[in-house]
Amino acid sequence: MKNLHEQVPAETPKISTSQWSYPARVILAVMFVFTLLALFIFISPIGRDLAAALLFAFVFDIPIRFIVRRTSLKYRWSALIVYILLYIVLALLLLIGWRFLVNYLQGMITNLSHAASAFLTKLQGTAGGSASSTLSIAGIGCEWFLYSNAGKFVHERVYTTSG
């Protein structure tokens, strides 16, 4: 009977491969992990939220640890203080800044309304004008041409190339 606890040296491998150095393996492993993380963040919608949460956690960790070092508070209480201060600042910004936001949105709505009325005026002018008038509307990478033939509008899309 054989002794099962006897240690026998392993055979030498029959196929020899070149071994990568330890720093090269670490660098490639880190690049692989970052590539997977980037794919996860940019492809998945929840990945962006998780990346933002991770960023906020790292950013808010600095003042939390500062409070822990300077006072005798535990980490959880200093984190609670930092997040409560953050919520207070955001609430104050919301209460103070809503007027500016409303004014900005009202100005934008007014500008859009003026542009739409000018556009409709131009369309009505072309409909009542000559038998074949053209209105060109520029877009990104294309132009729309509106033709009026006896009160009936026909549109055509022409793609433009930049030289």
Image (cartoon, rainbow, N blue to C red):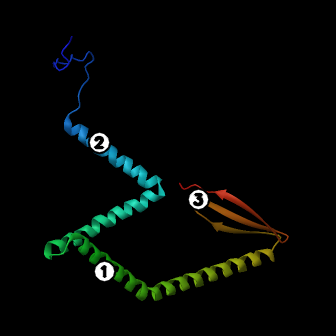
Mark before the other along the chain sequence, 2 or 3: 2
First along the sequence among labels 1 and 2: 2
Q: CA distance from mark 1 to mark 2?
A: 39 Å
Q: In which quadrant of the rendered view does residue 65 lie?
A: bottom left
For label 2, the crowd category at 10 Å Cα-Cα, with few meaning under 14, some 14 to 19 and many 20 or more, is few
Q: Quadrant of the N terminus?
A: top left
Mark 3 residue element = loop
Along the viewing direction, whichever of 84 and 116 lies nearer the viewer? 84
Find residue 141 and name its label.
3
Q: Quadrant of residue 51?
A: bottom left
The extreme right residue here reads 150
Local secondary structure at mark 1: helix
Q: Is residue 18 left or right of residue 120?
A: left
Classify mark 1: residues with Cα within 10 Å, few (<14), some (14-19) or many (20+): few
Q: CA distance from mark 1 to mark 3?
A: 47 Å
Q: Which residue is mark 1?
A: 85
Residue 36 is marked as none
Residue 40 in the image: state x and y as whole percent.
Answer: 42, 51
Q: Which of the two marks, 2 or 3, is nearer to us in this view? A: 2
| Three-letter amino acid code at the position of disc 2 | Ala
For the residue marked with disc 3, what is the amino acid?
A: Gly
The reply to whether discs 1 and 2 touch (Cβ–Cβ < 8 Å) is no
Per the model, the C-alpha gap separating discs 2 and 3 is 42 Å
> Which residue does the image show at 60% across and 64% down from the upper left?
139
Q: Amino acid at mark 1?
A: Leu
